[in-house]
Structure formats: structure tokens, C-alpha cells
Amino acid sequence: MIGMANGPLYRTRKGVVYQGLAEDILRSKWFKPLQNKVNLIFTSPPFPLKKKKAYGNLNGEEYVNWLAGFAEIFNELLADDGSLVVELGNSWVSGLPAMSIESLEALMELKKRGNYHLCQEFIWHNPSALPSPVEWVNVRRIRVKNTFSRIWWLSKSPYPKADNKAVLQEYSPAMKKVLKNKKYNSGSRPSGYKIGEKSFLRDNGGAIPSNVLYISNSASTDPYLEYCKKHKIRYHPARMPVDLAKFFILFLTDERDIVIDPFAGSNVTGWAAENLNRRWRSIEKDAVYARSSKVRFPNAWDLNGGR
């Protein structure tokens, strides 16, 4: 049975899940020892949706102030070379085929209050996204479907810990051919940039990824989803793909570093961190989502005793 506890629910050898409001849990006794030690806060907070969702949301000035209110809390937790990565989806003006900018306003206010550096903006493109909003895309046919959301990489320092060698991608067939034949059309490009043949022909083990991430979110074999359906438990409707969390964890942290997700949902971030040998802490206000996420961790144990 899903409990209504407010505090630690379960743990693994690397992490702990807490149920409660993030603004309360992050300031609690459980997180005091982590101040100035967290290497990555990676999260996807509720979007400022106009239609009420099961996982809760605010909108308007209330939403902007709520999200920006975490700036001080995050600053206290982040290490000097730590990173804050926030994924925010798109929302629409109620009743109109026009985009809302509330999520952008909230991010900018968060950046301002936290005095953060914007290291880079990423686009997560989900090619399997369903057409939405239905009224404007499917019914009236006056808009195209949304398939992307923005991910903002912020930091306290302009030089946070980061290593793109940890997220290299497989070379394209064309690049593999170039490396094999040791021949490339070097020289000036239309931009005026000159590419040297020797440096370009060096095999670095893979290609540096771009800031546009093509990651599908259509997995039907998620053990969490299977468990919820089997036991008729309400499952989280906005689960992110584990590969998205893995990308930023690999890029911005080392093994044994600390990763936090204050709006964990079904705890994909903790699951990714666990598999990548990072320490982690996750917070979810909804008791159903928090408790059912335990299925991702076969060796986890309840914190009221007993595994």
C-alpha cells in the first residue's frame, strides 16, 4: 500500500528517495550535510501548464516565483564547480494557438536570483512525441506538433566540472571512411575557418556531440511502467528517457559524485545515477510516485526497517 510519509522512504547503497515538498526536504536535516558538496542537480520541474495535470502545476507569476525561489537553496547545495541542469517543456496560452513564455521567464528569474552562469542551452528532440496541442495540430491543423523541449545548463562558476570526452558519439560512416583513408579536404571553409588535415584526421575515439539531443521517449519496457500497470497503480505521466539523464550525469560528474533530483517523479535520475556509480538523492512530493519508483531498484530497502 502506498504510504503518506513525509521524509525518507527507501534507499539503496548509493541513494535515498524522500517524499515531500522539495522546498521543505532540501532545507531539512537530511540535506544539511550535503551543502556545497552536490556536483549536479538534474531535474525536470512541473511545467506551467494551463490544463491541470495529475502531477501538479502552477502558472503565471505564481509559477515564476515558485521556481525562482529555489535559486538560494540550490546555491547552498551545489559545489563550487557543480552544475544545475533544468529541463522545461513548452506550454501554450490558454485557449489560443500561441506559445506561453512563462517557463522562459521562470528560468531567467532563477538565473538572476542565483547569479548563475548559463553554460549552454540544449534542445532535447523527441522524434516519437505525439501531436499536441490536439486542438491546434490535429483538429484545426493550424500548428505543427511540438517535439522538443529546452534544457538549461547553469552553474555557480563559469568553469564547472565537465568533460565532453565522457559523452563522445560513434563517428558517422563518412567520418570513419575519412579516418580509414587518411585523406580529407582541408583548407578554408566559407566561414573563413581553416581546418588542418593532421588535426582533423586524428581518431579521438568518437565525435563530440552537439547541443541538440535526439532521444526518443517511447520505451514500453520500463520496469516501473510494467509494475504500475500490473498492480493498477497510478503511474507518472511525464517520465523522461533514462538516456537523457545519463548524458548529463556522464558529462558533468565523475563516479561517486553526488546527483540530486528535487522533482523526481518516477525517479529516472536516481536510476541513471545508480547505474553509473554516482551517489544520489531524489525528492518527490507525490507519495504514489515516490513509493512505486522503488521497483526500479530490486535491492532497495524501506527506511522503516526490512528490505
Image: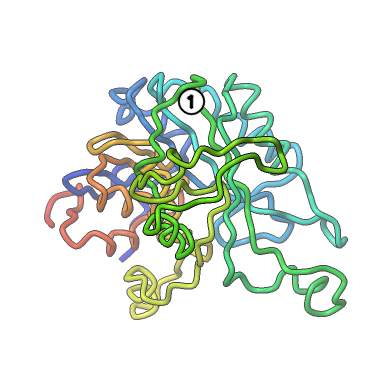
Query: Residue at image x 72%, y 46%?
Result: 59
| Quadrant the C terminus occupies | bottom left
- Secondary structure under tag 1 reads helix
Amino acid type for the residue under numbered disc 1: Ile
Q: Position of residue 264 (x, y in %)?
A: 43, 50
Measured as percent of width and height from the top left, residue 193 is found at 64, 35
The number of discs equals 1
Horizontal side, residue 188 vs residue 18: left or right:
right
282 above or below 92? above
Q: Position of residue 49 (x, y in %)?
A: 69, 55
Residue closest to the eye, 204 or 279: 204
Image position of 279 (left or right of 195): left
Instruction: State the residue in front, 177 or 114.
Output: 177
Q: Residue at x 51, y 67 (%)?
A: 216
Q: In the drawing, does residue 26 fall left or right of residue 152? A: left
Question: For mark 1, what is the residue?
Answer: 73
- Residue at position x 48%, y 42% in the image: 197
Above or below residue 32? Residue 10 is below
The answer to which quarter of the image holds residue 306 is bottom left
